[in-house]
Image (tube, coloured by chain):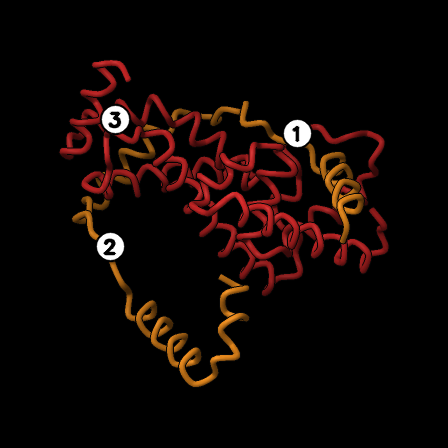
Chain colours: A orange, B red
Amino acid sequence: MNEDDQDRMRKFLQQAMPPVKGESEPRRDLWPAMLRRLNARPAAPAQIGWAWFDGALAFGLLGLAAFFPASIPLLLYYL
Amino acid sequence: MQNGESNVLNQFQRGDAAAFETLFHQHQHAAYGWILRITRNPAAAEELTIETFWRIYNAYARFEPGRGFEGWARRIATRAALDWLRARRTESELSTEMPAEVASPVEADPAVTAEIRRKTAIAFSRLPPKLRIAATLAVIEELPQKDVAAALGISVAAVKLRVFRALRLLRKDLERQGITP
C-alpha cells in the first residue's frame, strides 16, 4: 500500500467514523461508583503481580524461540 | 507545577485517600474523554474510567510526582481500554451480533451511507486491539503521533507501523465486504 492509498484510506475512515474529539463528559458523577469500588475491595499492595499463566506463556515463548530460531521474527512482528 | 498541585501529588504518592479523591475529581473528565475516543462507547467509557482510577489507586507507590499525573493516568487508561477491546474482540468472535460501539456517539458525514459506516465499524472491530487503538487515535482522532506513542508506551516509529498495518487490514476487510475505499 503506497502513500496515496494510505491517504485515501485515512480520508475514507474520517468520513465513515467521525472523531469523538474527547469533548464529551460522563452522563453522571462517577465518584459514588468509585467509592463503592473502593469500599468493596481494599487496595492491594502496590506490586507487579505475575499470574501463573504469564509465566507459562513466557516460558513457552522462550522455548519456541530456543528450539525454532526462525520463529523469532514472527514473534517480534506480533509483539 | 503549582505548589498546591505538587502537594496533592506528593500526598497521593504516600497513599493519601483525600489526595486521591482530589485527583479523581480533577482528572475524571479527561480520563473519560480519552477512553471514549478509544472505545467509542459511552457506557464502557464510564466503567473504564472507574477501572482506570482503581488501577491508579492501587499503583500509588509507583507514581513519580515529578513526572506529572496526566500522562501516567493516560497510559493506565489506555491499558484499561486495550484490555476491554481484547475482551470485546473475544466476545465478538464468539457472537454473530454487531459490536455495541458500532453505533457512533457522534454525527457522521451525511455523504457516507449508513451501510458503509456499519461495514467500516465492523471492519474496525475486527482489527487486533493494538492496531485498532493506534489507528483510532492517530487516524480517526488525528492526534499527534508522539502523543499516541506516549499513551501506548511505544516509539513513534512503532505507531506509524501499527497504523500502516491497520490501514492495510482495513482495506482488505472492506474490499471483502464489497467496499472500495
Judging depth in this view, the residue of A39 and B132 nearest the camera is B132
- The label nearer to you, 1 versus 2, is 2
Please state which amino acid type lies under the numbered disc 2: Ile
Secondary structure at badge 2 equals: loop
Q: In the image, residue A42 lies at what x, y percent?
A: 18, 44
Mark 2 is surrounded, within 10 Å at the Cα level, by few (under 14), some (14 to 19) or many (20 or more) other residues, namely few
Give the chain of mark 2.
Answer: A
Please state which amino acid type lies under the numbered disc 3: Glu
Image check: B71 left or right of B65?
A: right
Please state which amino acid type lies under the numbered disc 1: Val
Cα–Cα span, label 1 and label 3: 31 Å
Residue at 82 percent across and 29 percent down: it is B110
Secondary structure at badge 1 equals: loop
Q: Are marks 1 and 3 on the same chain?
A: yes
Residue at 36 percent across and 71 percent down: it is A58
Name which of mark 1 and mark 3 comes first in the sequence.
3
Residue at 43 percent across and 80 percent down: it is A64
Query: What residue is pinned by disc 1?
Result: B106
Judging depth in this view, the residue of B89 and A62 nearest the camera is A62
Cα–Cα span, label 2 and label 3: 24 Å
Judging depth in this view, the residue of A9 and B179 nearest the camera is A9
Q: Is residue B162 above or below residue B141?
A: below
Query: What residue is pinned by disc 3?
Result: B21
The quarter of the picture where residue A3 lies is top right
Secondary structure at badge 3 equals: helix
Identify the mark at residue A48; answer none if there is no mark.
2
